[in-house]
Amino acid sequence: MKKHTVESCAKAKMAIRDTLDIVGGKWKLVLISVLRSGKKGFNELSREAGISPRILSKELQELEMNGLVSRKVCDTKPVTVQYELTPYSGTLSEVLSAMEKWGYLHRNKIVQGIE
Amino acid sequence: MKKHTVESCAKAKMAIRDTLDIVGGKWKLVLISVLRSGKKGFNELSREAGISPRILSKELQELEMNGLVSRKVCDTKPVTVQYELTPYSGTLSEVLSAMEKWGYLHRNKIVQGIE
DNA sequence: GTTATCTGTTACAAAAAGGATAGTACTTAC
DNA sequence: GTAAGTACTATCCTTTTTGTAACAGATAAC
C-alpha cells in the first residue's frame, strides 16, 4: 500500500487530470477498446461504437493528435481509411483493463442488489 | 495478454461504459484521489480540489449514492460534515493507480518532446 | 447586532459536449 | 445517369456540464 501525504496527493490529482484530459469524455476509451480487436475503417468504427460520424471524426483526430491512434489512407476502389492503435496506446492497457474489471465488478454488485 | 474477439470486445465496451457512468466526468476520480489522504470537510474538499460548492455538492451526492463515499454529520460548534471513502471505493484503487501512473508517464513524454 | 464559519442551495449564465440530418467528393456498378 | 459505398464536413439544435455570485440556516465570537 502507498502512503498518501498532502504532497503526493496533489501530484496524484494532477496526474489524474492529465489522464482525463487525454482519454476522458464519453468516447475515447470506448474507441480504444473497440480498436483493440484490430484496425477498422471509419464507418465500421461508427457502427461498432454506435457513434455519429461528426463526433467520431473529432474523437479520432484528437486520439491521433495524442499519438494513440494512427490513420492510414488505403488506395482502394472507394478510398478507405484504416484506424489502428499505435504501440504507444499500449501504455494505456493497465488503465483499460482496470476499468473493464471494475465495470464487471460493479455491474455484478448492482445486479445482486436487485435480485 | 488477452484475446480480443468481437464478443469479448462488446463486453469490454459495456464494462468501460459502466465504469465511466460512475466515475466519469471531470471531478469524481479527482475527488476520490483527494479523499485518499483522509476524511475531509466540505470546504476543505472544495479548496483542495479547486471545485465550486455547487458542483462539489452534486458530485458528492452522486458518489455517496454509488457507495463510494460516506457522509457523516458531526455535532460540532458550527455543524461540520466529514466525507470519507468507503471500503467499497477501495475496489477502484487499481483504476486510480493505473490512471496516476499513465498521467505521469504521458506528462514525461510530452515534456521530453518539448525540450 | 454585526461579523464570521461551516454547509450547503438557488438563480443565472456560459461553455462544452453530444446528436440528428443532410450534404460533399470520389469511384464503382448497373 | 442513377444508385451505392467510402469518408468525412457543415449546419443546426439539445443536453449536459461547469462556473459565478449571492444567499440561507445555524452557531459562536466580539
Image (spheres, coloured by chain):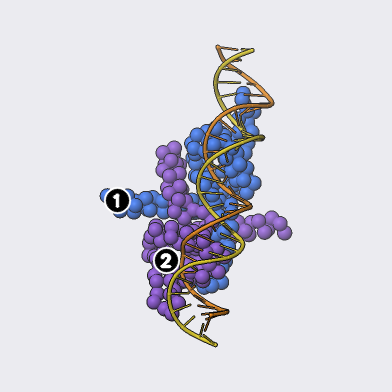
Chain colours: A purple, B blue, C yellow, D orange
Q: Where is residue A11 drawn, in percent x and y?
A: 41, 43
Residue at the location (62% across, 58% down)?
A107
Assign a secondary structure to mark 2: strand
- Check disc 2 and give the amino acid type: Leu
Say yes or no: labels 2 and 1 on the same chain.
no
User: Residue A85 got which mark?
Assistant: 2
Q: Where is residue A76 drawn, in percent x and y?
A: 42, 78
The residue labelled by disc 1 is B114
In the picture as drawn, the residue positioned furthest to the right comes out as A115
Residue at the location (62% across, 49% down)?
B66
- The quadrant where residue B79 appears: top right
Q: Where is residue A69 drawn, in percent x and y?
A: 41, 64
Whether residue A97 is visible, yes or no, is: no
- For the residue pair D7 and A39, the one nearer the viewer reads as D7
Residue at the location (42% across, 66% down)?
A85
- For the residue pair B6 and A110, the one nearer the viewer reads as B6
